[in-house]
Amino acid sequence: MDKLFDLDLRDPRTEGRHLAIGLMHDQFLAEATEAAENFNRARSGGDSPRSSTNRSGRGKARGRRGGRKGRADRWSGLTTGMDTEVLALPSEDSLPLPRAQQNPQEMFEQNMERLSALLDSSPCPAEPERSAASSWSVRQQKASDRWEEARPYHLRCLLESEAVGKPLCCFCHKPAVIRCRDCLPEQWFCGACDMHNHSKRPLHNRDSVVDGFFKAIPPSTCISRGETGIYATHEQDRILPTMPAQHCTCQAPSFTVEAGKPVILITINGRYDLRLPRYVCQTCLQQWAPDVRDLVRSGYWPASANASTIYTVDLLNTFQELKLISPGFSRQAFAKLLEHRTLCAGRSGQINGDALQRSFLEFAYASFEKDQLCCDTPFTCPACTPEMVAVSADGNRKLYRFGHTGRSNDTPFFDGLFLAKDSEVSDFVNTIQMAVKNIKGRGTCGDSQWAAARETSRRASKLDEEGVEVAVCRHGFLLKALNMYRGEIFAYPMYLQKELLPSKAQFFAMDVACKYWPYLQKVASVIPALKSLTEMKPFLSIMHARAHATKCEIKWSGRNQKGAGTTAGEEVEQINSYLSRCALTTKYMSKAARVDMLTVHAMGWNHHKAETLHKALSTRYVKTSKRAEEEAERLSQLQKDLQCSNAMAVQWIAEVKEWAESETPVTGLHVLQQSIEGLHLGLKQQKQTLYRQNDSNKLRHRLRRKLTADKKRLLQEIEKYNSLVADLSKRIDVALVDHSLAGQSTGAIWPWEDYGSGMHFSMLLKCHA
């Protein structure tokens, strides 16, 4: 019993219980007070004390010490032993009236006032905050428990939904033979009512219940009951629903509709074998059928020139949305999905995926031309108009196409719109290759070899297009692209830079800007028409800059470019992660279909970006403002820790930049250092990709032989370098090199990487960072 009344007033769940117990206590106290008054009145006046229970006429009279007076004496003795605080009775004015004399409304108002006073005096403490992970896990656990509890009931409901029963027609109340859920709530039909209602609704999916279970039937199947009471099925032509079109010149035409030539309609629910309507004017007896214009106005799109097969516009829009959401979703998979839905609805027939893709591209191009009439510019960033801050370019080697697939001579619908024309790109590349003598091999910077830092490259034997070079703005809008046929060479981003010159971009961002910009200056000195490209400023993307040399990062990184703001230069990587998923299908397409499909994906990406641009800009503004305040505090704290003024900090930064601009003297040792670093990096990369990119044992055997030869050459170069260095501490430790090639060492292994640990230089780099 003690536990039942052990209340914690801090717990909001016990407040109602506490209030109820308080009310019961007040009622008990009032009744005790009333009993005490009656007893005192009876003793003083000789009257018997009043009781709420009338016991007159029951039993014989008791003695002087018995009965009610004895109980009163015992009650008086009991109350005398109680605590005086418990028996401290209120005055007569403040005593509550007996329950029988109080108005229920007054009692309710008094109780509500007491409840309000109790809630105000005892505020509920805030519940302990839970982390997002714990609250999510609790919600998921509760949802799982609820689903588990409701699972048997759901199964029972599913089984009950398969019971046919004895339904009646919703119109004539005869026994129903057809169920049509597309007509809910009036879903039950007899044979006659079904023919009357669905003769003009051939796209409804119906089920027959003649055999005692639900069986899907095509729209051309009708059920009738014979004279013997047996149900029979028969076929009837269904007409394609279209808008009525008048082709005669009668003032008040009155025409009938008949079944015309067959037509295949494909919707999101699958294939329908229907008939085109044939209109016959009763006045002039002229006959006509809907043409393509009438079909398009009715929401259809032809799958061929003669419109023997048509698609609904809703189907094509759905296919486009699926392609944009899941770029790897193929047309064949979508056709299989439609065929499955056809079979589930009791219909039959195959769906041609190639015809679906061609019709979809025709529809996409027609929609693009319609938007062009509204002055729509799908490859322009609204936030970068009229002047652009930065353009970021990078190659995507995953968007290749096999050379033996799709040998078609069709011209792309979007030729030159997003992907540049191959002939123009090829002429530009040939001009560059003839004007400048190119250096073979990859560029090396820091501890990395860059495949994109090439001036020339060979073509792949089994591929036609080897990838796509993409240019985007700082907000992630696709601007221009081109097909790569020779790997990632400098001529491709140079062509994109030339095409985007009218946008007046201030910076041109790349992951190998330190190698590309000297090459651009060399080309511009030979070809004056490209000299305007050097008016842009080079921008090394900030994440890739971490893999470059220290001097390179200080000189070229976008974080150190005045006017770049928070531009990262990595926006193209986000685009490539999306476009790379298109390669699952585009690598097997024809050249024209690949160009069109990539253009459709690019327009869809930009459309989505434009719809959410206001949110992205608002979020970026808030983050940038907050970061500016944090960086200002960080700079102030750093100056306080280093005890330097603004002028001293500016001087330090100038010294760091001066050191980064200084050229490393080119000597015989410097040439050996570059050769050793290049061989070492090549060996490490070849070992890492030995099993990742090569499945053939024969190929891996040839690569191992090449690795052995390169390692022998590396050891020879190291021996030659050590023979030229007199200081033993500056020589290369061959054991460290072996550990590094085996993946067991990640520290500095070259003596020339020791930049010194002086306090002055460390403080310079720290202040610059």
Image (tube, rainbow, N blue to C red):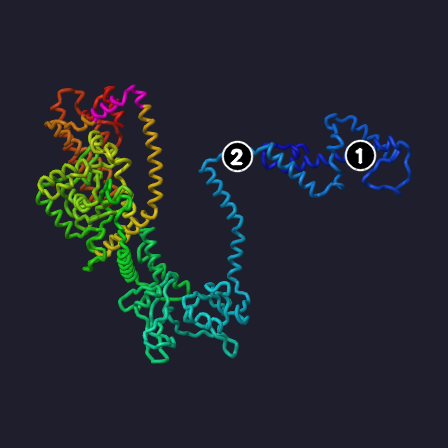
Numbered tag placed on residue 35 in the rendering: 1
What is the C-alpha distance between the residues marked 2 and 1? 46 Å
Numbered tag placed on residue 127 in the rendering: 2
Q: Nearer the viewer, mark 2 or mark 1?
A: 1
The answer to whether 601 is drawn above or below residue 170 in the figure is above
Q: Position of residue 391 (x, y in %)?
A: 23, 42
The answer to whether 755 is drawn above or below residue 528 in the figure is above
Numbered tag placed on residue 556 in the rendering: none
Helix, strand or loop for the magenta stretch, by majority = helix
- In front: 349, or 88? 88
Q: Position of residue 289 (x, y in %)?
A: 32, 73
The mark nearer the N terminus, 2 or 1, is 1
**Residue type, mark 2 in image:** Glu
Q: Position of residue 205 (x, y in %)?
A: 43, 65
Would you call the spot at circle 2 few (<14 residues within 10 Å), some (14-19), or many (20 or more)?
few
| Residue under the image location 63 percent in, 33 percent down | 7
| Residue under the image location 29 percent in, 19 percent down | 643
Circle count: 2
Residue 212 visible in the shown view: yes
User: Magenta residues, as a range?
Assistant: 638-656
Horizontal arrangement in the rendering, residue 206 relative to residue 744 (left or right): right
Question: Is 140 a magenta residue?
Answer: no
Mark 1, secondary structure of its residue: helix
Q: Position of residue 94 (x, y in %)?
A: 73, 33
Horizontal arrangement in the rendering, residue 727 relative to residue 583 (left or right): left
Q: The N terminus lies in which quarter of the figure?
A: top right
| Residue under the image location 10 percent in, 42 percent down | 528
